[in-house]
Image: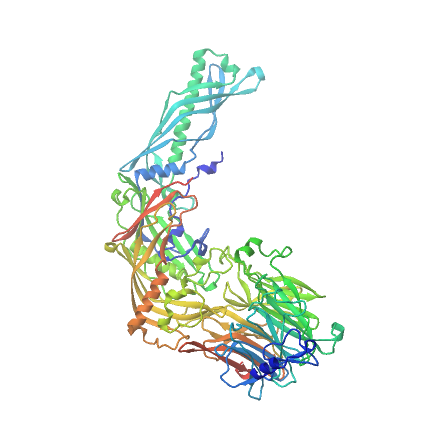
Amino acid sequence: MLLGAVFGAGCPSPEEDACAPACESGSTCEPLTKTCIAPRLERFEGALPGRAVRLEMRGARAYLAMIHPTENRLLVGEARATEAPTFYTLREFSRRMPQKIALATSETTVAVAWLDADLLYRVALRRLDAPADHWQIVTTATGELGAENYRGSQYFDLSISTQGLDQGATTEGSQRVRLVFHDARTRALRVISAAFDPPPNASSPLWSIQNIDDPGAQDDILSCSAAQRERVGRGIGIDPDILQRGTLTYVAYQDADCGDLRLARRLDGKWQVSVVDTGDSERANEHAMARGDTGRFASLALDGRGKLAIAYQDITRGQLRLALERAGSFDIQVVDPGLELDASSRLRKHQVGGFASLVFDADDIPRIAYLDATTARLRLSYRSRRFGATGQWIQRNLAADAPTGFSASLAYSAEFGMALAAERLEPGADGVLSGLEFLSEGAL
Amino acid sequence: MSATIFQPRNTLLGLAMLVMISPATGCDQARNIPNASHAQATSFQAQTLRALLSQAGIEQLLEDEYRLGIPLERSAQPTTDFGLELSIGPLAQPFEIARWQVESGVNQLDIGVMADAFFLTIPMRVRDASLGEHATRICRFTALADQAQINVQATLAPVADATGSILPMLSSLAAPQVVLSAARVEPVGSCPPVDALADHEIEMIHQHLLTYLEQAFAESFASAIALSPVKSLGLLHAPAAVERVSNFPNRRGELWVNGRTNAAGTAGARLDTDGLLIDLDVALNSKRAPCAPALVAEAPGADPAGPLTQADLAGAHAAIALATPLLSRMAQASVSAGFACRGLEDSAIELDSSRRAIPLATQDLNLEEVGLANLDLAPETGALLIAGALPTISTDPANAALNLNWEALSIELYAETQGVRVRILEIRADLAMSLHLRSEGWGITQNQVRFSLNALDLSRLSIQSQWTRQDLSNANANPQLRQWAQRAWLLVLQDFFHFPLPLLPGSSLRLDGAQVRSDDLLLRFRFDPVF
């Protein structure tokens, strides 16, 4: 990687041959296509960490990305059910490690995004059929989008989809990347997007930026007052989760000022925002004046009927909830109330629902992995029958040793089956060491 | 004027007073359940709540009840004078009292009031044939006096209230005596049938008007003093329930309380030279919150509160003594009702929810002592309190302290890492605590008796954490860990215990002091109206 950087620096190209903007450190500019070519990645052989781990499935392969918090690396890798996984260092950081990453796949491409030290996002792309160490990294500060246009935060998510020619693509197989994020400057939920040629020919894309939900423009959403927003001042768009299906795009996220779960839908190029759950008190024996704080760790999925479901944490009640779309509105269900009888016959309240991750399996059964923050263990809830049939939620603790369950990421494909990745923390002499907990079908 | 202003105001302790010596519980965590007929508290502890109201206190009580005046009311009275058919009155208006004066004796209360110069308009209907065969003319007269003085002798009598409870009521022994100084009557406008009379006849009619007024004063004053001190002071005399309010369903329980006047004296009350003394029997029970230990509270103790005399008031208007067994019973019932399941109910987006948490500064906890350094924790740690047993309370008057023994009490520490609040440590021990009364802050802003944790002794200590490699397995025998745990307990509990005095809104009683005695906890109050 270092050689590549030196090589690139030592062979200045004529001005007209240079990539614009300049290639990321470590990449070289391919003069014919004017694209930045990343060097082949260095294989990572050490113990796998699990910080901010993300898992995606595509066919028989599982794709993973995670942060190595002590070696300051961003690792990417893939696994097949029958093969040992391989991992590579996608990026090394000299300062300001990202705390989160986003991972997405399309039919042809896998993409990883992170927030870099300059508070701008980077996106790395690789064709699924390309060698596992062959990635291309692009910055998002190009086109109409400059560094002055936004300030990224650690609340973001990524989607990538293959765009047809009928959708405005200029090249067959063009990839549309959308990165939704909480803008640390405007405190709004925003999206940056761009169309790419499939890597490795992804030339410098033209990024555009759009507001999805702005705390300064809430006149038509009266779920809470302007005074409340001003007092809390955290903004909108915490823990966004983006889901792309065909021409439809959904984003679930938290309105942190009001403590609400919100959903934005992109329809005909416009975003429509609705409040899914305010979490406010409805019972006389709850805190009467309490404004509920809900909607953290939103996780979106569509069931087999195309119904939208959102799993999320209700912080006020320390429970895992699920909002299920029905006839234009949402039914709110308590998936796991976090109540357990202890050895002394006391009903204990566990703080559950952190890092909720929702998928539907082959039988259309919803499964949600999440953290029980009281026991610091992974937990899985699933419904006894699919939605639409009478059923109940069943919970169980997963076998992994505590503390584990951070950044739980559940994924499913028919070929691979169900798999779960999460961070396991091992107490060490200097704090806790990050490890990867990877559970596949048999353990789930 | 609406009659409601004359309703006696509940000024002393509401039933929620019985939400105990307990872990500090904000008002938003307790809710009175109205008409709590389901509250089964039938095991009465005799004379466990005693109240003394001094002479000055009775004066203040009456003054506070009738701050806007006593209701001066009398129906119209017909009479015939000098061939005129007259109807004097009615009167229905508040009458302002300048001073109340009470002298208390054995079984007797001398109550006097003084009113400064006043005038009142008294209507009088006069049949006036000149206006028609059945016509009546309404004339008005102003009654004036330089001063009014009303005196009555009162005593206590048992009276059944609407719920069937027998309550002591003040009642006059004889008709109040009314003395009006320089009283006179002046007509308001013309009144032809009266104006046509001779002067001495007019004077006689004016005298009738004054007599009517004096009678109105006497009747109204007798009605005004006929109140129940138990009700006026807001002392418990019927079943009531307090519900633990929580967003966590496992914390929702109910505290059931009941009070009745003791059989001794006149329906539990008596008058003597110290003032008015009331003895109540209190019963407490609970509907267990699922978070509370599944244990039956101890049988109520039989020891009554100690006697109350003028000397115990130390200048205060009122004193209430709560017997030690009642304190213990309150503590146990409250823990069982879920009031000790505390912590983690605060919200980042809500105003004033911090009292629902037990916030600690992470750096104050010295977590490196238990191997929890370098966890990259947020600066604030929250504590969760979990009761494994029911506490007991005893009094330690020599040290002005309450001794609170609480076995199998746990705290769990939650700290935020990676954006989620996770449990990082559990500490469990049997605690023997000495709670000191904190005397600072009495007065207008003070609505609770606060205790500071003066001494804390640990036994059967255990510490557990999944986040450390340090060996915590034998914490009870490890001096460093014991020292660390004791410090952690003190940090969590130092401002934790208080005795809420849920005075009803608008109350003019303020806590003036408290004292631990051998048999009880004594609370002193002053009337201190806020306007």
Whether residue B391 is visible here, answered yes or no, is: yes
Front one among A6 and B190: A6
Name the residue rendered at 41%, 66% in the picture.
B362
Residue A122 vertical position relative to residue B208 in the rendered view, above or below:
below
Image quadrant containing the C terminus of chain B? top left
Residue B523 appears in view: no
Question: Which percent across, then down, holds residue A92?
Answer: 54, 78
The quarter of the picture where residue B220 lies is: top left
Query: How many marks on residues?
Result: 0
Q: Is residue B404 left or right of residue A125?
A: left
Q: Position of residue A414 (x, y in %)?
A: 63, 82
Q: Position of residue A349 (x, y in %)?
A: 46, 67
Residue A213 is left or right of residue B471, and the answer is right
Residue at the far right: name it.
A166
Check the image and name the residue furthest to the top: B198
**Which residue is drawn at the image coordinates 61% and 55% (left, top)?**
A222
Front in this rendered view, residue A54 or B261: A54
A315 vs A254, nearest the viewer? A254
Res B213 quadrant in image: top left
